[in-house]
């Protein structure tokens, strides 16, 4: 399903106790599939309570470059995603970016 030039990177973040995610999971995660060399996001998954929420986050981030577009990614999340987990989503994306940067070294 995914070309050999793609990799899977996971970012995690703590979630607040009032977030519905906390009833099901201890933390928020985002799994990002990206092109190894370019950093372009080709697919992702995350552990939201509702599939539509995960699909919405996915639709926002596909085609961004995890390395080069981090400021735009953060602004897009702040502008479009107004769920309780907004800060966790941003933190998890940044965590995934850091892990990807370590892999690139």
Image: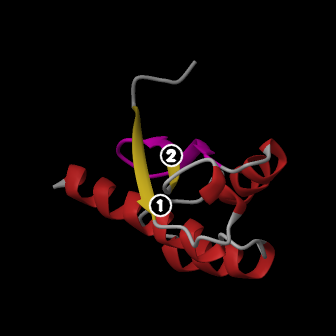
The crowding category of the residue bearing disc 1, from other C-alpha atoms within 10 Å (few below 14, some 14 to 19, many at least 20), is: many
Residue annotated with mark 2: 32
Query: Does residue 9 appear left or right of residue 26 in this picture?
Result: left
Comes first in the chain, label 1 or label 2: 2
User: Looking at the figure, which quarter contains the N terminus?
Assistant: top right
Give the residue at x 53% y 24%. 2
Could you tell me how many numbered marks the image carries?
2
In the displayed structure, 77 sits above or below 103; it is below
Give the residue at x 53% y 80%. 71
The crowding category of the residue bearing disc 2, from other C-alpha atoms within 10 Å (few below 14, some 14 to 19, many at least 20), is: many
Query: Does residue 37 appear left or right of residue 93 in this picture?
Result: left
Q: Main secondary structure of the magenta part?
A: strand
- Residue contact between numbered discs 1 and 2, judged by CB atoms under 8 Å: yes
Residues shaded magenta: 31-47
In the displayed structure, 59 sits above or below 6; it is below
Q: Position of residue 29 (x, y in %)?
A: 50, 52
Secondary structure beneath disc 1? loop
Q: Quadrant of residue 94?
A: bottom left
**Most foreground residue, 102 or 27:** 27
Q: Position of residue 64 (x, y in %)?
A: 59, 59
Query: Does residue 35 appear left or right of residue 104 in this picture?
Result: right
Q: Is residue 5 magenta?
A: no
Q: Is residue 43 magenta?
A: yes
Residue annotated with mark 1: 66
């Amino acid at each position: 399903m995914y070309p050999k030039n793609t990799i899977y990177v996971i970012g995690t973040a703590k979630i607040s106790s009032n977030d519905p995610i906390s009833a099901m999971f201890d933390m928020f995660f985002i799994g990002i599939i990206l092109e190894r060399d370019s950093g372009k996001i080709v697919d992702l998954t995350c552990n939201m309570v509702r599939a539509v929420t995960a699909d919405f986050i996915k639709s926002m981030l596909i085609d961004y470059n995890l390395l080069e577009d981090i400021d735009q990614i953060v602004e897009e999340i702040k502008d479009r995603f107004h769920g309780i987990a907004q800060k966790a989503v941003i933190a998890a994306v940044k965590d995934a970016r850091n892990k990807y940067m370590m892999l690139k070294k």
